[in-house]
Amino acid sequence: MRLYFLGLDGFAANIIFASENRGRWPLIEEVCQSGLYGMSECEPDYAFTGPSWMTIYTGQPAAVHGVTDLWGRPVNGSRTFQTVREPFIWDVLNRHGLTCGVVTMPVTYPARPIKGYMISGFPSPRLSVTGNVRVPSDFIVDHSQEIRKTTRLPGLGYSWHDVHPLEEDLELLKACELKKAAFVEELIQQQAVDVLFVQYSCLDRVGHELNNYARRGQGYDLAHILGMYDWFDSTLFPILLRIASDYLVITSDHGWQHGDGFGKHEPAGVFIARGEDIPQGLRTDCRNLDIAPTVLDILGLPPENVAGHSVLVRQSELDEVNQQLKGLGYI
């Protein structure tokens, strides 16, 4: 049994579920209708990368896992990936004998030894890898990694945005994601694992890039956000779905909204789960706390002592309830 855990940073519920966008992204809608789907709410005070992804990894709120910094740095009392005391989902899976591949999941620097392999996600000052896998020395973890190599400009971000016009910058962002997707396909040929975790950031990065150009006086145009979703649905998503698995889980750390000339995070991300005995097209909203225990439940593993709970509904259970209701004359 194999499970594919696809992390999509900033995959926004208020965008993909908006009535005005219905029918615009057929593949996204098809995947939603092939399983459970809905909003995944993070803590409103921690609707950003470090705390929310750490909650997804542990099933615990920020008050418990202790990562409160945007980038998981040891500042203002925040814990880090190295100092979190709670077990991560891949640690739990390893204990149950399942191997894991963890590829560019955010704030996982430095990579930790696991049964399988790990490639750190952003922000990573250098390429950090554990396990018996080959990773090119020039592998780009995330588009922002290239941006941070350029000169920091107070109030404006980085000199990257003075060198690359917006349209060129967005094309480079797409190229980075495509390169990662190709690498992941090669990686799983090197070493098969029971559970594969991979994260892509283009749906979040596009908003941050628009903010960087807005600081330079260029208008913030929501059309660029929607255009990135168009490209994701037509070009990147089909490639990501080529990875074979028995179960697919897709989730995001937060959503995105636009206002006052800039964009910002908002709490409602997305959750999707499909596979054998999972109902199709059933709307099931959850919290990011619930992702880890739901993954364990999908794999038939006992729940951990976490704050979240599984939101999995099995088709066989629905059928049994329907049969009982039918026998009682209710349906």
Image: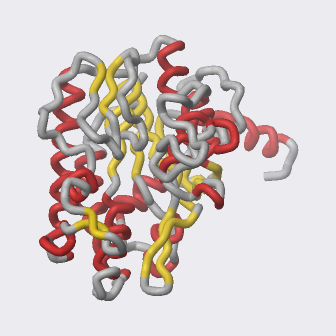
Q: Residue at x 28, y 56 (%)?
A: 144
Q: Residue, x 47% and y 78% (percent of image)?
A: 258
Left or right: where 298 falls relative to 24: right
Left of 322 or right of it: where is 66? Answer: left
For this orientation, the residue located farthest to the front is 154
Name the residue: 61% across, 54% down: 42
Establish if 235 lies above or below 36. below
Compare residues 221 and 273 and report the one nearer the observer.
Answer: 221
Quarter of the image for residue 198 reads top left
**In-image side of 169 versus 252 (left or right):** left
Instruction: Please give the count of numbered marks on the rendered protein.
Output: 0
Looking at the picture, how far across and down is residue 237, in whole percent?
A: 29, 54
Q: Quadrant of residue 192?
A: top left
Question: In the figure, is residue 238 to the left or right of 289?
Answer: left
In the image, residue 1 lies at what x, y percent?
Answer: 42, 22
Please provide percent x and percent y for residue 240.
Answer: 28, 46
92 versus 54 height, above or below: above
- Which residue is located at x 53 percent, y 13 percent? 96
Residue 280 in view in this figure = no
Q: Is residue 12 above or below residue 314?
A: below
- Residue 109 visible (yes or no): yes
Scheme by which the image is coloured: secondary structure
The picture places residue 113, in percent across and down from the top left corner, at 38, 18
